[in-house]
Each structure stands twice: as structure tokens, then as C-alpha cells.
Image (cartoon, rainbow, N blue to C red):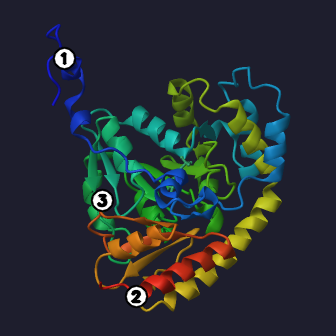
Amino acid sequence: MTDTPPGGFDVTRLLRPDLQAMPGYVAIEPIDELARRLAIAPEQVVKLDGNENPYGPSPKALEALAACRHYHIYPDPLQREARAALGAYLGVGAEHIILGTGSDEVMDMILRAFVRPGDGVINCPPTFGMYPFLTRVVGGRVLDVPRRDDFSLDLPAIKAAAQQAKVIFIASPNNPSGNVLSRRELDALLALELAVVIDEAYVEFAGESVVGLVPSRENLFVLRTFSKWAGLAGLRVGYGILPAAVTDTLMKIKQPYNLNVAAQVAMLASLADADLLGERVRALLAERESLFAALAAVPYLTPRPSQANFILCRVKGGDAGPVWRRLRERGVMVRYYPDSPLLKDCIRISVGLPEHTEALFGALKEIGGTLGN
Ligand SMILES: *Cc1c(COP(=O)(O)O)cnc(C)c1O
């Protein structure tokens, strides 16, 4: 622990004790780190751990970024052009839309607007780790209602927890299991007195969105992002489609210039290039099917069907650590969950390009014989 400094005053005593006790968010490892450790070029790393889009941004987005001459001017705090463009794209009024530095920031805005210290937020693990993390940062109480074995929701337990909660987060498709929320489950959630946040980060890979329902519901909040389908994860652009009165409050409390000029330029150009980005999504869906079939043929893996751009695989034998480690030694990064009791025997593999699938299977074949050592 820290020594008391000469002045006798230790400023860390003023920090919130709950934050000091809180675990940090376990983020993915940068490519450069692994490349340096393995002494290979960063381009040789096969990155299948972050569900990023291997095609990158649309060429139109890159051109627009190069052509923009306004990087020295603050962006519009009211996000007028971006909200109007998204409204037209989604068929929803701009008064329902707010953009953030990734959809992660919209989650944070919602929590800051609704949750006071001690208020409950329902989390349904295994799911996206940002929900409990951001809840703890605002001092909220995480109410875990684990999913069933098939990763569907435990609705009776959610209903019971709702008595003490203000917000529930549900990813659909869920990360990391890849399954979607059914309409019956959605209706059951919307009947509760909760802000129901449906995180559609992967909806472009799944098909049906519930965005169209927002204007006619009191308590439906939808989150979307440009990180996955549009290849803009590094630029940080996400958005929420929310009841108009909630959007007004979030607009009031957000950082005024949160949507930066580059992010806005790239998202507008991406919307204008949605056809090309849609073709890439279809190519990833085709690759997902090849990847699934090939994983199903590996004797020590059991892949789970997915409606997103990743596949969760159970590793026979109970611990996925050895497979994760041996893939990593071969420059193949996948996601592993050593801290999650529900996922200790699982790895999550992002859908990449055909050559990434090939490299993954080269490595899986090599390590097949070494497992159990
Ligand atoms: C990747 C992901 C996001 C996207 O977050 P951004 O901040 O928009 O990059 C949101 N939710 C889930 C479940 C995700 O997996």
C-alpha cells in the first residue's frame, strides 16, 4: 500500500472506496503486444478475438476522412447532421437518436441518467462485460440473473429482480453466445417497470432489429454501433434509439463534443456506402457458415450456432485455457474467459477472412495432438 507522503495527507483516502475495490474491465490485448512477444510481424497475427470487421472501413469513409478540412473546428454538440442521417436510414425520427463515442458511451449516459448509488441494474451473464463494469462505475448495484443452459433468459428470475432495479441490459444477438432475444421474451421484458436496453451491436449479422418499435413503446431503448458491420471500431461511433424524452435528457448530460469530427465524417460516408458494407456482411455470413462446419469437425470442439460475427465453442475436457494458449503461441488470437465460471470451457472465435479461417485451422490441427499434455 502507499506510504503517507511528507505532508501527512494521503489524497487516495478521498477516493471512492467502492472504486478502489472494483475490478477493472478486462480489455483485449493489442496486436502489437502479441507480435512483439512472439517476435513476428503485426501483420502475421490472426486477430479473431475482438469481433472487429476484417474488411476495415468503407473506401468512401476513408476518402471522406482524407478530404475533410474541419478537424480544427469543434463538432456540432446537437449532432444535427448525424441524427438526421441516421433517422432517415432507420426510418425513425431524429428526436429519438443520440450518438456516442461507441455505443459504450451511450450505455454510460443511460446509467448516469437513471442510476443513483445503490440502484439496481439487471445483468444476464454470460454477456457483455461492459454492463456490470459501467454499472459499478456509477455506484449502481449489479443484479445478476444468469441465463439458462441454452443461453435464453430466466424470465421469472428477471421479473423478481425487477422489483429492485431500474435498468436491464440485454444484448441481441448476445455476446458471446450468439443467440437472439425472441419477440415473446422482449414483450415480457417491456411489461416490466424497467428501462429495457436492447443492445443490437451485431444485428446487421442477424437480420431483424427492434428499432422500429421504439416510438410506440414507453421503455424500449436500443443501442447500435458502427464498430462491427461498418468496420469503424477504432473511430468509436455508436448510437441509441430511445424514447424522445429520454433522448432529451441524455443530450443535456452528455459531453458536448462527444461525437468527434472524424467519427461523424466516417459514419456519414458509411451510411452512404451501406450497399458495399452490406455485401461485406454477407461475405462474413458465408464465412461464418464455413467456419462453423469446420469447427464442428474438430473432435475436441463443439461450436454453438450463432447469429453474429463470432462463434462460441465448447472445448471438451472442461478448460479452454490450453487451446487458447497454444493458439496464441501460434499467433492466433481468440477470446477466452478464465474468470467466468459459466464459460471456463469456452473460446469465442470472431469470423474473419477465408485466409484467417485457414490459418486458424492450420493451428488447430497442429495443437490437436498436443492437448492433454
Ligand atoms: C462490440 C460490442 C459493442 C460495441 O461497442 P462500441 O462501443 O460501439 O464499439 C456493444 N455491445 C456489445 C455486446 C458488443 O459486443
- Beta carbon of the mark 3 residue lies under 8 A of ligand 1: no
Left/right placement of residue 300 relative to residue 158 reads right
* Residue located 45% across and 68% down the image: 329
Residue 302, quarter of the rendered image = bottom left
Q: Please determine whether, in this image, residue 345 is positioned above or below residue 223.
A: below
Q: Secondary structure at mark 3?
A: helix
N-term-proximal mark, 1 vs 3: 1
The amino acid type of the residue labelled 1 equals: Asp
Say few, some or many: other residues with alpha carbon within 10 Å of mark 2 (under 14 / 14 to 19 / 20 or more). some
| Residue 29 pos. (x, y %) | 46, 53
Q: Please determine whether, in this image, residue 288 is positioned above or below residue 14.
A: below
**Is residue 201 among what the camera can see?**
yes
Say few, some or many: other residues with alpha carbon within 10 Å of mark 1 (under 14 / 14 to 19 / 20 or more). few
| Residue 113 pos. (x, y %) | 43, 32
The amino acid type of the residue labelled 2 equals: Tyr
Quadrant of the image containing the C terminus: bottom left
Mark closer to the observer (1, 3): 1
Residue 263 vs residue 356, the one in the foreground: 356
**Is residue 194 among what the camera can see?**
no
N-term-proximal mark, 2 vs 1: 1
N-term-proximal mark, 2 vs 3: 3
Q: Which residue is mark 1?
A: 10
* CA distance separating discs 2 and 3: 38 Å
Q: Secondary structure at mark 2?
A: loop
- Beta carbon of the mark 1 residue lies under 8 A of ligand 1: no
Q: Please give the label number shown on residue 159.
A: 3
The amino acid type of the residue labelled 3 equals: Lys
Quadrant of the image containing the N terminus: top left
Residue 166 vs residue 24, the one in the foreground: 24
Q: Which residue is mark 2?
A: 300
